[in-house]
Amino acid sequence: MVLTPDQVIDQVKELRRQHESERAELDVLRRYWLGRQALPAIIPQDAPREVKEMARIARVNVISIVVESITQGLFVDSLRAVGAGGEDVTPQVWRAWQANRMDRQQTGLHRAATAYGTAYNVVTPGAPLPVIRPVSPRLMIAVYGDDPDWPVWAVEKRPRTGGWRLYDAEAVYQVDRAGDRLVARSVTAHGRGVTPVVRYRDAEDLDLDDDVEPEALGGGYGLQVSRVAAGQVAPLMPLQDQINLSSFGLKAAEWYSAFRQRWIVGWTAGASERMKSAASQLWTFDEQPDDVRLGEFSQTDLRGYLDSREAMLKYAATLSQTPVHELVGELVNLSAEALAAAEIGRDRKIDERKTGHGESHEQTLGLAAGYMGVEMPEDAEVVWRDTSARAFGAVVDGLGKLAQMLQIPPQELWDRVPGATRQDLQRWRKAAESGDAIGQLTAMLDRQAGGGETTTRSGLILPAGAGG
């Protein structure tokens, strides 16, 4: 049943309060993701300006590398959707994907799900095709009941207009701000019987809805803490702070004690003399040289700071299953096999995300197909691009052996060729069909030649006895 305007306003207000609480925690993750987190709390408020500046530039953002490393391995190329009767509905459903520029938008969707742990796709009716819009969890909250696949309610913040959208199983409600009040402006029924919002999760966690509370830190230090435990950002936040602190110590040592500092007892120089002495390699004193003593402080060895930071980078690579060479930068003459072995942990992690995100993509396309009046088969599946570091020749050789030794039709293996897109497959199939048509024509001519005519290898028909 469609809600009344008062019911819409009450529901938006309630969900908006929950969203504002989650938004504060997600904003912390956003800052760490982009390297804009607060300066270390150990730096005093009255610290010199150069100290605060060193703390600012000492933020070495490792988390963004981890997020990008996973996201760049997630790219949907096509869809397989063949009905029980053998009807291929892939071209019809895939039109909605292409029309909504999901080849481009899927990267933002996967990136948000990887970083925050959750992201959403909203699918609404449209003309001539349904509208698919990825939404960040910083702009949407969804409330789930007994069905984990479809939310009961979902509210989306519209920052450009200052309004909100409420979604339920019946309709989409537009709510705008009029001064200090919220006003329900429009209602659009969608007729799908479910709330048209699809959730994407970085990883499945059965305890996520009833998780333990974070440990109380106390002390009132003003630390940035988020209760969000999912995604790739939250688990790495403590390690990111340690890396930043080591980098800050390195910068402070470079600034204050990485070079030899000279000292003089018994002589005070003026401004011009100080400049000359700083540039001079040999100092001389005309008056009372016996009362003047020269010396210098030894410089600080920076190797300990560098080793500490490198060790933490390797630890971050281990915790996040990111290849070490992507964080440390050590990549020297690795073969394709060695590179594939170094990235096997990351590839397994990406494969797990492909399984979860693939189900969500199939939900999204199923909603779009319903709006288009197309029945989406239950065994439909999206096809992911192969982004692993395996050698191209080895993959092709393996596919050739599958076709030759196991008698798998070669056309069924084409979509496993690395880098092959759906458009490539369509061109290959058309070329194959064209080749089969020529073969059928040749066979027909051969049959016609059985009545006294002969066909040469080039397909030329000759009278009987004119040639063999």
Image: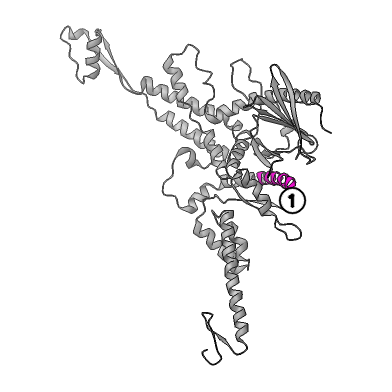
Looking at the rendering, which quadrant does residue 223 occupy? top right
393 vs 202, left or right, is: left
**Residue 77 seen from this side:** yes
Rendered residue at 60%/71% (across/down): 437
Q: Residues within 10 Å of mark 1 (few under 14, many from 20)?
A: some
Instruction: State the count of labels.
Output: 1
Q: What main secondary structure does the magenta stretch of the protein show? A: helix
Asked if one can make out residue 214 in the rendered structure from this viewpoint, the answer is no
Tell me if residue 57 comes above or below residue 265 in the rendering: below
Residue 366 is covered by the magenta coloring: yes
Q: Nearer the viewer, residue 228 or 365?
A: 365
- 310 magenta-colored: no
Q: Which residue position holds label 1?
A: 374
Residue sitting at x 60%, y 42%: 106
Residue 402 at what x, y percent from top left?
60, 64
Rendering coords of residue 432 (x, y %): 58, 66
User: In what quadrant of the picture does the N terminus appear?
Assistant: top right
Image quadrant assignment for residue 104: top right
Q: Nearer the viewer, residue 23 or 226?
A: 23
Q: Secondary structure at mark 1?
A: loop
Residues drawn in magenta: 357-379
- Residue 242 or 454: which is nearer the viewer? 454
